[in-house]
Image (cartoon, rainbow, N blue to C red):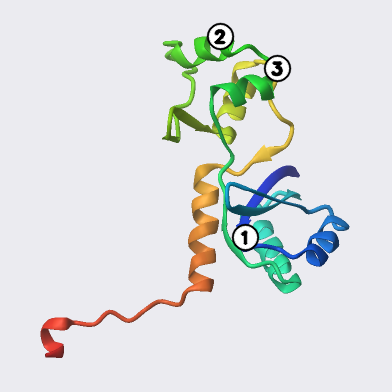
Amino acid sequence: MNTYDVTYITRPIDETLEEALSDHGVNVGSHSGLHFVMTSLITDDFQNAAEELALDLKRRGVDIERMELDLVNQSGIATRCDKTRQAVSSWVQSHDVVNPFPNPHTVVSGPLWAWSDVNEWLRRTGKKGFDDACSASPAQVEAFNAAWRATRWPTVESVDYASAS
């Protein structure tokens, strides 16, 4: 069994629902206009557990938009690993062929890594500072979001405009 930390982006949640969720170990928050719920799953089947949790939250009144990937910058990696930014910078710039540091997942004002990739690299290389809890991988988040979109927005029939006129 693995413990996964999961974050869903949601529509705003009222205080009554927030209190009820808190009683069940679900944290609710918002930042920069995004609303979210965070909790942990203990499972060997992440995809099914994440979907079951999302459906349970939906039944309780939470309007989930998507699952969020746990992204970190170099400072965030340093903080989570209790290392200096310089140490993390040397990991990032290393030319280790056998155990290369993960590629960034995306770039905003600087590179952002999927914490799941960094955490796995820390474990694999024997570095201290990895989490015992897992974060969903980019592939797991994408798979969940694709399945969730399919349940929220039914397929729209395509129209052949050439023959419609």
- Cα separation between marks 1 and 3: 31 Å
At numbered mark 1, what does the secondary structure look like: helix, strand or loop?
strand
Could you tell me the amino acid type at mark 2?
Gln
Question: Residue 82 got which mark?
Answer: 3
Q: Is residue 19 left or right of residue 39?
A: right
Q: Residues within 10 Å of mark 3 (few under 14, many from 20)?
A: few
For the N terminus, give its image quadrant: top right
Q: Are marks 1 and 2 in contact (CB under 8 Å)?
A: no
Label 2 sits on a secondary structure element that is helix
Mark 3 residue element:
loop
- The reply to whether dot 1 and dot 3 touch (C-beta < 8 Å) is no
Placement of 16 over or under 97, stated as above or below? below
User: Cα distance, mark 2 to mark 3?
Assistant: 12 Å
Comes first in the chain, label 1 or label 3: 1
From the viewer's perspective, is residue 15 above or below residue 7?
A: below
What residue appears at the point 71 percent right and 29 percent down from the top-left corner?
A: 131
> Which dot, 1 or 3, sits closer to the camera?
1
> Crowdedness of circle 2 by 10 Å Cα count: few (<14), some, many (20+)?
few
Q: Where in the figure is residue 63, as x and y percent of width and height?
A: 64, 67
Q: As shown in the figure, which amino acid type bears the numbered disc 3?
A: Asp
User: How many dots with numbers?
Assistant: 3
The residue at which mark 1 appears reads as 10
Residue 125 position, x and y percent, is 60, 17
